[in-house]
Image (spheres, helix red, strand yellow):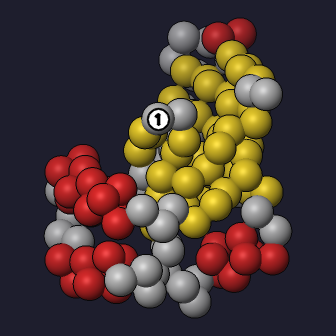
Amino acid sequence: MMVVWGFWRDGVFLFSTGTQSRKARNLKKNQHCVVSTELAHEAVIVEGIAEEALDVALRREFLTRTERKYEFDMSGFKADILSLKEPIFAVRPRVVFGLDEKKSLNSATRWQFA
């Protein structure tokens, strides 16, 4: 499992990573993955299948939304992301778990997707 920055769009979770990162190398060998939010007390855990998103318009949107959401300058990655040199992954969920620890451990929810 890996904690990643990303966002939901059209039923998939999008995130980026470097081509040479352990994440990218693992996903090249096996597309099954688990990603999670960074806040353990408000966890969302997604089990699914990751595919590289090749649509350039989607990649542009990814850059803009990531910069806005995380207040992080993505300009240094823009050329490589738009030229498909660096991957953007789209995770299609199979199972998602949600938990709000402050409400109680009984608040855990599980969703299954076909």
- Is 36 drawn above or below residue 98 in the view shown? below
Q: Is residue 70 visible?
A: no
Q: Is residue 112 visible?
A: yes
Query: Which amino acid type is shown beneath numbered disc 1?
Result: Asp
Q: Residue at x 61, y 50 (%)?
A: 91
Q: Position of residue 33 (x, y in %)?
A: 74, 56
Horizontally, is 112 left or right of 45 in the view? right
Query: Quick one: SS at disc 1?
Result: loop
- Is 112 drawn above or below residue 11 in the view shown? above
Q: Residue at x 47, y 35 (%)?
A: 10
Q: Position of residue 78 (x, y in %)?
A: 25, 78
- Is 114 drawn above or below residue 83 in the view shown? above
The residue carrying mark 1 is 10
State which quadrant residue 100 falls in.
top right
State which quadrant residue 105 falls in.
top right
- Which sits in the foreground, 50 or 66? 50
Q: Position of residue 28 (x, y in %)?
A: 73, 77
- Which sits in the foreground, 46 or 59? 59
Q: Residue at x 36, y 77 (%)?
A: 81
